[in-house]
Image (cartoon, rainbow, N blue to C red):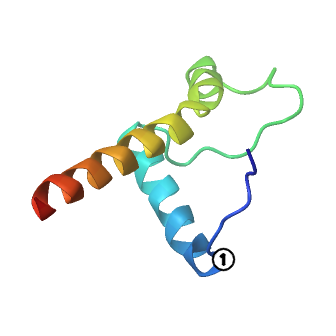
Amino acid sequence: MSRRVLVPEAMGKLEKFKMEVANDMGLDNIQNHNADMGDVPSNIVNKIKNSGNVGGEMVRRMVEAAEKNMVDKI
């Protein structure tokens, strides 16, 4: 599966949606920490480690919206 955006014009909206989901999950204001996290508080480290869940939550919300849209059309 490719990670590229099928509709390049949607990139901005997807990024906004990602930030909205991350904020809802309490993962706002997190910077990219790829190196040693020795000086980063543990609560921030846990949020960073859980930030991979953002993509899964985005998919859940998009599927839910698509299902609702399909039901509304019936």
Instruction: Name the residue rendered at 55%, 74% in the picture.
Output: 10
Is 37 located above or below residue 18 in the figure? above
Instruction: Name the residue rendered at 49%, 55% in the picture.
Output: 19
Quarter of the rendering occupied by the C terminus: bottom left
Q: Position of residue 63 (x, y in %)?
A: 36, 45
Q: For residue 5, what is the image quadrant? A: bottom right
Instruction: Name the residue rendered at 42%, 48% in the picture.
Output: 21
Q: Is residue 50 left or right of residue 36?
A: left
Instruction: Name the residue rendered at 57%, 26% in the picture.
Output: 50
Q: Position of residue 38 (x, y in %)?
A: 81, 20
Q: How many marks?
A: 1
Q: Position of residue 73 (x, y in %)?
A: 14, 64
Give the residue furthest to the right. 35
Is 12 located above or below residue 19 in the figure? below
**Circle 1 — which element?**
helix
Quarter of the rendering occupied by the N terminus: top right
Q: Is residue 68 left or right of residue 3?
A: left
The front one of 55 and 73 is 73
Is 71 located above or below residue 36 in the figure? below
Identity, as a three-letter code, of the amino acid under mark 1? Pro
The front one of 1 and 26 is 1
Q: Which residue is mark 1?
A: 8
